[in-house]
């Protein structure tokens, strides 16, 4: 947990000094203190992140591959950082805060190694933002929305160079990508997009009606569009955050069919191999079917389910919800499907 920081300027701490000439050393100290607190205040209140600064990118690719992944990581922050309005967001000017996201980004860079990997840091919301009333929540979301839009536009202008690209996210990352699709992308940019894998979030019927082209769902294994799935071990465990979704695909068949599919089509849970610093796949693991747009996984035992359910978040993700594992449960299927969609795009 990052400790709250309080800074006192030299002037404020010494406002009872008589009006006399101060020693040079004290003047230097005062100037330094002023600069330090001014910079701190500026960082905590900036309206836009400067994505020309490589500090705010985990990765910006080597451009040797034919297509890109623009990746947005899920919620990794669970605590407040300041005692003001910025407490809803991570302070990515701090190295230790950026470090919180690195294990997730490293895993995904390895998972999608076939593509140039672009991953910005952003002032994401802390977890408690999702417990706020709708009006407050919508207000809080504006800061990360701005960041991801700014990062994407910088990526398109400076890194993409006309290549096809995938958008990939999970949880809050997927939420930000959906907002980007709705309001931040031009028609030309959408045409360059192979697919948007917005795992672990929702699209409502209202959004779909308002943005039919921008949020067009992918309904087969190779078309352009938005790919969404939310995994649960039983339908009663569906998250209230996703209860209004009208979009969902079965990642075993890449269709909207509701028939039961056995585990023979599962290409593997993606896991990090620490000894080789690589991804391994454990398969077959689970079958499943779509129920009310949720992917109900039938083969997970209680030990597996319990491992990825947390009491602290049970109000949002009830026992049996597999949200915290969603980004890698079908890792093998997703990687193979990306190849299929890129081939179709190129044709």
Image (tube, grey):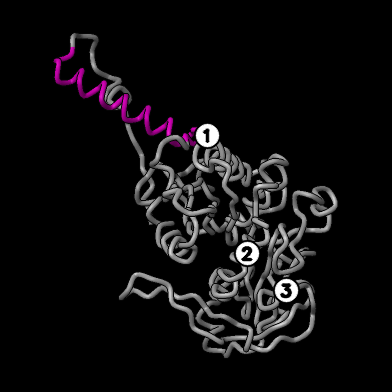
Can residue 85 be seen?
A: no
Q: Which residue is mark 2?
A: 199
Q: Which of these two is toward me, 301 or 41?
A: 301
Q: Which of these two is toward me, 174 or 27?
A: 174
Q: Residue furthest top?
A: 20
Give the class, few, some or many, for how many residues have Cα within 10 Å of label 3's Cα (few <14, many ≥20).
many
Q: Name the N-terminal-most of marks 1 and 2.
A: 1
Residue lying at 70% horizontally and 77% vertically, measured from the top left: 253
Residue lying at 64% horizontally and 75% vertically, measured from the top left: 318
- Give the image location of residue 52, x and y in percent: 45, 35
Question: Magenta stretch: residue 41 in it?
Answer: yes
The C terminus - image quarter: bottom right
Task: Kindly state the secondary structure of the residue where label 1 is placed.
Answer: loop
Task: Kindly state the secondary structure of the residue where label 2 is placed.
Answer: strand
Quote the CA–CA distance across marks 3 and 1: 36 Å
Task: Kindly state the secondary structure of the residue where label 3 is placed.
Answer: strand
Can residue 213 be seen?
A: yes
Question: Horizontally, is 282 left or right of 286 in the view?
Answer: left
Q: Name the N-terminal-most of marks 3 and 1.
A: 1
Question: Horizontally, is 21 left or right of 309 in the view?
Answer: left
Q: Is residue 25 above or below residue 54?
A: above
Question: Horizontally, is 41 left or right of 201 in the view?
Answer: left
Q: Name the N-terminal-most of marks 2 and 3.
A: 2
- Give the image location of residue 166, x and y in percent: 59, 55
Provide the major secondary structure of the magenta segment. helix
User: Which residues are drawn in magenta?
Assistant: 22-50
Residue lying at 63% horizontally and 84% vertically, measured from the top left: 265
Question: Magenta stretch: residue 174 in it?
Answer: no
Q: Which of these two is toward me, 75 or 62?
A: 62
Quote the CA–CA distance across marks 1 and 2: 26 Å
Q: Which residue is mark 3?
A: 294
């Amino acid at each position: 947990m990052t400790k709250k920081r309080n800074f006192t300027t030299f002037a404020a701490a010494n406002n009872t000094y008589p009006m006399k000439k101060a020693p040079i050393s004290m003047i230097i100290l005062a100037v330094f203190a002023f600069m330090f607190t001014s910079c701190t205040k500026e960082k905590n209140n900036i309206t836009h992140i400067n994505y020309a600064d490589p500090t705010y990118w985990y990765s910006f690719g080597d451009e040797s591959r034919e297509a890109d992944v623009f990746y947005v990581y899920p919620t990794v922050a669970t605590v407040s950082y300041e005692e003001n309005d910025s407490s809803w967001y991570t302070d990515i000017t701090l190295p230790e805060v950026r470090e919180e996201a690195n294990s997730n980004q490293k895993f995904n860079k390895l998972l999608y190694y076939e593509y140039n990997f672009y991953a910005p840091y952003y002032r994401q919301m802390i977890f408690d933002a999702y417990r706020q009333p709708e009006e407050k929540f919508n207000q809080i979301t504006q800061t990360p929305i701005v960041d991801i839009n700014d990062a994407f536009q910088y990526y398109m202008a400076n890194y993409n160079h006309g290549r096809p690209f995938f958008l990939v996210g999970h949880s809050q990352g997927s939420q930000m990508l959906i907002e980007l699709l709705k309001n931040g992308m031009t028609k030309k940019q959408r045409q360059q997009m192979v697919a948007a894998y917005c795992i672990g979030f929702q699209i409502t019927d209202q959004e779909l009606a308002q943005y039919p082209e921008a949020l067009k769902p992918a309904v087969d294994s190779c078309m352009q569009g938005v790919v969404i799935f939310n995994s649960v071990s039983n339908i009663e465990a569906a998250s209230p955050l996703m209860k209004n979704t009208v979009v969902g695909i079965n990642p075993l068949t890449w269709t909207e069919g509701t028939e039961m599919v056995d585990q023979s089509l599962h290409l593997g849970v993606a896991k990090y191999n620490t000894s080789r610093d690589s991804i391994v796949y454990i398969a077959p693991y689970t079958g499943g079917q779509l129920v009310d747009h949720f992917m109900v996984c039938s083969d997970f035992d209680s030990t597996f389910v319990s491992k990825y359910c947390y009491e602290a978040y049970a109000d949002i993700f009830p026992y049996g919800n597999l949200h915290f594992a969603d980004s890698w449960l079908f890792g093998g299927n997703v990687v193979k499907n990306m190849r299929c969609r890129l081939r179709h795009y190129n044709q």
